[in-house]
Image: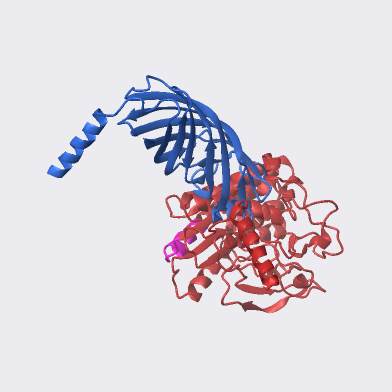
Amino acid sequence: MKTKLHWIAAALALAAGGTAHAQQAGRWIAQIGVTNIAPDVSSGDLSAPSLPGTKVDIKSDTQPSGAIIYMVTDHWAIDVPLALPFKHDIVGDGAIAGVGKLGDVKALPITLLAQYRFGAVDAKVRPYLAAGPTYAKFYHERSTGTLSALTAGSPTTLTVESKLGLTVQAGAAFVLNEHWSLDAAVAKTFLKTKTSLSTGQTIDTRLDPLSVSVAVGYRF
Amino acid sequence: MRLVRLKLAALGAAVALAACGGGGAGDQHPQVAFTSMVSFGDSLSDVGTYKVGTIAALGGGKWTVNGPTAKNWTELIAADIMVAPPCAAETGLLPNIPGLVGAAPVTNIPGCFNYAQGSSRVSGIFAPNSATLQAAPFNQVNLGLLAVPIATQMATHLTRVGGAYSGTELVTVLGGGNDFFMNFNGVAQAAAGGAGAAGAAFIAGWSQSVQAAVSAGGAAAVGAASQAAVAGMGQAGAELAGLVKTQIIAKGAKYVVVVNLPDVSQTPFALALDAPTRSLMQTMVTTFNTQLAAGLNGAPVVFVDAYTQGHDQNANPTQYSLTNVTTPACSATSPANPLQGSSIACTSASLIAGDTSHYEFADTVHPTPYGYQLLAQFVAIQMAKAGWL
């Protein structure tokens, strides 16, 4: 118990004693944390032959993530988010809502953000806004027997087109001390893709995922 | 050595390609570990009861456009649930048409659990082209279909498996079509009256008072027959629901699919008839389906509304990639089919001209392989919604 208190006191002291200028021009920041990506799907209809209104939904996934940030000026930064590949389940919706999992797909979003950090370089909290392109790489698509049965593909396979989209982000860095900070961010990516089945059918989907990340940052 | 290295390099490239390639098939197993499939019904589920003698020699045997890849919906569902392809539980054919070779005696195939036979009714033994109609006083010259009633099919299965289901079978039931045809035949014969009308009423299964009423002929007879036909269909629907509950569910089956009767009034057979007649046909079908659904209300079955789905396919053929929903693909005049276009003897050698691969109907009432595929896909959706796929 005593030891624990010691540690907390030490952490508080560190935080309080953090040197200013943690996020000024020329600094590199590396982050490590977790990101949840939740697609906000608006699905088109699967092309013929299909039940009218055959749609899909795509489920969220959480993976370890990180970022490399370079402070170009005291306010402008370049942020390259990194993450392990996400794996999203594809499930039936619309006329086939309730049929369960149709497949899954791995997604690797490759994003480059131009970030503007508000506040002084020595501020304890630095909110930021960012925007930039995202290339969503989709790969390793896997179908289930349900998809095969619904589309008479025996078996049916699917491919999801990798696409370029736009990401906007809002977040804040909470500076703990000269080196360490906590970071929380919410990002929205505007992204449309098309999925093709081996049966020749296609379905357009607007994915527009919302990403929520929390991370610990270290400034070099 | 060099060769080996080259081979290894090729292998490495192949592995790399496989790893980064596009989509693949993941685990295709269904949620439920089914062990077998048991089917009861009529021609729509029959996988080859009559694939004997002349029919087999012609390349026929299923009620569709026959061919090496032609499957009906029960075969497609069996593939979906990864059980052995269904085979006919009984084979044989007893034709008395000169020149047509059948197969007698009838053979039981113990390891096969698809009991569905073309022309089977729910419980009636007099059915379209059934061997039972060859005897006096009917004296029909016909194909001699076995047409074992669905009630008997279910009892036979229970006898074979010791009186109970294991609980891991998928059981499918689709019937009522031949009750429709026999009841409709009673209506069609009523106007002429006499022994013909009375006989048709008898084999439809109508009461003695209706048999007497129709023998008088005329409009009154048609009226009485129409009433009896609708009532008869209601009775058949209720009876089939009762059989599903007492002979399948109560005997331990846990996964039961019941498909209702597609709308016969939308088949090519009906399109040749006038509007009031088609309206009566539709009432007969809906009365059957209403009683079937009412009887199974609350029962643990996946109820597949093929009637409504068929209407949607007819109304929106393009949505289902159907190119024709009114014309049979099988030619009624092809010399390659001695049965005047009946799908049981129809193959690619006896089709009408043009591309019929996406026609709905093979003959005047039975689906093409593509029509069966659409039915199987619709059944699969309902099974998936129940968590079985």
Q: Dividing the picture into quarters, in which one does residue A119 lie?
A: top left
* Front residue (pair A25, A2): A25
On screen, residue B321 above or below B250 = above
Query: x%, y% of residue B3?
Result: 70, 71
- Residue visible at 34% across and 23% down in the picture: A122
Q: Tell whether position B132 is magenta.
A: no
Q: Colour of chain B?
A: red
Quick check: can you spot residue A149?
Answer: yes
On screen, residue B269 above or below B244 = above
Quarter of the image that includes the N terminus of chain A: top left
* Front residue (pair A76, B22): A76
Q: Residue furthest top?
A: A119
Q: How are the colours assigned in the image?
A: by chain
Q: How many marks?
A: 0
* Part of the protein shown in magenta: B239-254
Quick check: can you spot residue B229?
Answer: no
Magenta portion: prevailing SS class: helix
Query: x%, y% of residue B297?
Result: 45, 50
- Residue visible at 20% across and 40% down in the picture: A7
In the image, which lettered chain appears blue? Answer: A
* Front residue (pair B113, A190): A190
Left or right? Give the position of A97 relative to A214: right
Q: Residue furthest bottom?
A: B105
- Residue visible at 52% across and 60% down in the picture: B29
Query: x%, y% of residue B120?
Result: 62, 63
- Residue visible at 45% across and 75% down in the picture: B162
Q: Dividing the picture into quarters, in which one does residue A205 lie?
A: top right
Quarter of the image that includes the C terminus of chain A: top left
Query: x%, y% of residue A156?
Result: 62, 54
